[in-house]
Amino acid sequence: MYLFENAVLQRELLVNLRMSRGFVLLFLYQALLALVVYFAWPQNSHLDLTESGDSDARKLADMFFIGQYILASMMAPSFAAGTITGEKERKTYEMLLASPLRPTAIVFGKMVASLTHLAVLVFTSLPIIMLCLPLGGISLYEVLAAYMGLIISVILFGTISVACSSFFKRTAASLVVSYLLILPLAMGGVLAWLLLADWGPFRLLMTVTVLPVVAGAICLVLLANTAARLLHPPDVGSEGQEVVDLEVEAQEAVGLVIQRDQFPDKLFAPAKRDDLLEDNSNPIYDKEIRSEIFSQGTLMLRLVIQVSMVLAIPLMAVCLYIWSQYAAWYICYVVLFNVLVGPVFSAGSVTSERERETLDLLLTTTITPWQILWGKLIAGLRVSSVLTMFLLWPVLLACLMVSQYWPNLHCVAAYLGIVLLTCLTTAMVALFCSVIFRKTSLSLMVSYLSIIVLFCVPLAISYFATSFYDSEAARWAEWTGVTSPFAAAQAIPLDMDYLGSDEDAVPAGNWPLVGTYAVLTLAINLLLLGVMIQMFNVRWRVAG
């Protein structure tokens, strides 16, 4: 019932493992890891079988594991967050619940099937890391323990994603909440691995004893809760509950309640219109901002606000008030929040019209393509930017309360500019993907992938060059960050002498990189907007 006779597991495995993109992903994953090992291979390597080993080999192994851990933590929600919401979107959820399979068997089958391909990716990288063993510095037991911790983490992240999938009706909402919950765990795992690098035996002991127990307990609780929701489903009747009554939801909500007629909630969730639309106003924008974004309820919004604020409190205290020289790290957290949340409100703007088969009808109206595009863009941008601004008020408060920021107001203004450019870029990239693709889930995943390539890959290249190459190569690699708001935020120098810290700790700063980032980012956004307008104009003429 659970393994060999589980129809859900068999069907999901056949569908997932026979898809051509699975083989393409496997090739790209292995090629990426192989390139990392090839370019990071120590130039002066020698066979060293002592316990001390080679520092370059140790550094290479740590980078290999951390990189694979981050990739796995990012891919786990993409495989598992749509397991149950996909059934709801395909209108097959009730049929699945009516089958003779037990809820625990359904949940178990969904989770195992979604993580099987990811497990294949992880295990096929073993031969690559085995090439590093002759360099010394790392033992076979550490490799096996690292892979054990990696597999356990993947199972935990997959379980969290499946649990989120049972709470929402759309994959996009499930995906963003999964990322928000998994991100702190993944960052904590990376920090723990790095901090315990000098205590190899202790790190090994924690990996094989404490981690399996804690992760196993969390997985059991989440699986039991998800199975209970399927046994007594509160969201049956998907055909008749596509639009949620927000007033009823607000009365039954636990925790944060969104009041759409009060400030500041009305900034991102304006109340429904009860009068006629004004002359010369954009009906697309009005529909999107007042009804479309919140048609599936406010559960995702409430969770996003609460989780982001809880995570922001310790970061705010440490980076803005206690050690103000690390203010850029808090800005990076705000940017990361927008990267996770921003695409959700724009990636389905046009694909949802295609899925409802209303795009052709929309194009035959008197509304121009420019009105359609800016209405959908501004609606998604308004929600994501307001949610992001909620995390920026501590920065403005710090400027008033902490006198060390007073001579650095130009740096704070640059931080705010970087965040605003990030909000614009994430919304624009997501809207562009929504125009290109036909399904919202595919549009959202490509949006995330494109943003990661723009924002995070330059950081990896810079860190790689700094760790394994000379200073000249690292200096040139730093300029790959002209597309990354993270690199731009770190390049802004605060006046550390005024803060009373050592002169050696003063960052040199790189204002030219910041300026180049701003210009290049605006150019990319204008280019994407121009391409979308041209595509809509061509379709407009054909349809008209």
Image (cartoon, rainbow, N blue to C red):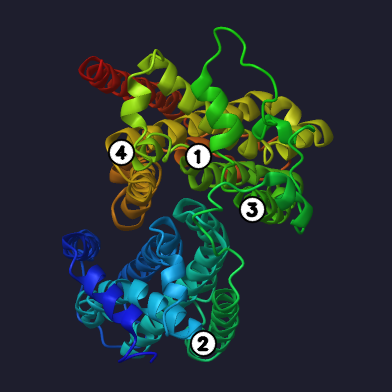
Residue closer to the observer: 277 or 433: 277
Q: Residues within 10 Å of mark 3 (few under 14, many from 20)?
A: many
Residue closer to the observer: 91 or 134: 91
Res. 212 mark: 2
Q: CA distance from mark 4 to mark 3?
A: 45 Å
Q: Which residue is mark 1?
A: 345
Q: Amino acid at mark 3?
A: Leu
Q: Is residue 371 left or right of residue 315?
A: left
Q: Which residue is mark 4?
A: 476
**Occupied quadrant, residue 417:** top right
Q: Which quadrant does the N terminus fall into?
A: bottom left
Q: CA distance from mark 3 to mark 1?
A: 14 Å
Q: Earlier in the sequence, mark 4 or mark 3?
A: 3
Q: Is residue 379 left or right of residue 312?
A: left
Callout 3 secondary element:
helix
Residue at x-position 71% and y-position 37%:
395
Q: Nearer the viewer, mark 2 or mark 1?
A: 1
Callout 2 secondary element:
helix
Q: Earlier in the sequence, mark 2 or mark 1?
A: 2
Q: Earlier in the sequence, mark 3 or mark 2?
A: 2
Q: Which residue is mark 3?
A: 299
Where is residue 127 shown, x and y percent of the image? 19, 79
Q: Amino acid at mark 1?
A: Phe
Q: CA distance from mark 2 to mark 4?
A: 42 Å
Q: Amino acid at mark 4?
A: Trp
